[in-house]
Amino acid sequence: MKAINIKWDTDGDMEVLNQLPTEMEIPEGITDEEEMSDYLSDETGFCHYGFDLVD
């Protein structure tokens, strides 16, 4: 699975926002959406407002 259209929370810092990925591959063992959310934040160090999933 892949998370796309990730809406990062950068407190309006456009420089940081432009450096963050807009999509990320989700490892196979992660199937719960809450775990996916944690994975995205853990990998980048930033929280997000949401994302879409594609296979």
Image (cartoon, grey):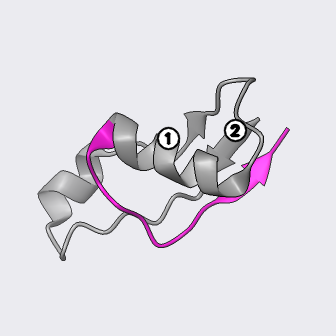
Residue 7: horizontal and vertical position, in percent? 46, 66
Residue 2: assigned label = 2
* Prevailing secondary structure class for the magenta stretch in the rendered image: loop
> Which part of the image, by quadrant, shows the C terminus?
top right
Residue visible at 70% across and 59% down?
A: 52
Judged left or right of residue 13, residue 50 is: right
Stretch of the chain drawn in magenta: 44-55
Judged left or right of residue 50, residue 44 is: left
Residue 11: horizontal and vertical position, in percent? 18, 75
Disc 1: which residue: 39
Residue 37: horizontal and vertical position, in percent? 54, 54
Q: Quadrant of residue 9?
A: bottom left
> Which part of the image, by quadrant, shows the N terminus?
top right
Residue visible at 18% across and 65% down?
A: 14
Q: Earlier in the sequence, mark 2 or mark 1?
A: 2
Judge whether residue 50 is colored magenta.
yes
- Residue 33 higher or lower than 43, as above or below: below
| Label 2: which secondary element | strand
51 or 34, nearer to the observer: 34
The amino acid on which the numbered mark 2 sits, given as a three-letter code, is Lys
Judged left or right of residue 40, residue 44 is: left
Residue visible at 61% across and 47% down?
A: 35
The amino acid on which the numbered mark 1 sits, given as a three-letter code, is Tyr
31 or 40, nearer to the observer: 31
Mark 2 Cα-neighbour bin, 10 Å: few <14, some 14–19, many ≥20: some
Q: Quadrant of residue 17?
A: bottom left
Judge whether residue 20 is colored magenta.
no
- Residue 15 higher or lower than 23, as above or below: below
Mark 1 Cα-neighbour bin, 10 Å: few <14, some 14–19, many ≥20: some
| Label 1: which secondary element | helix
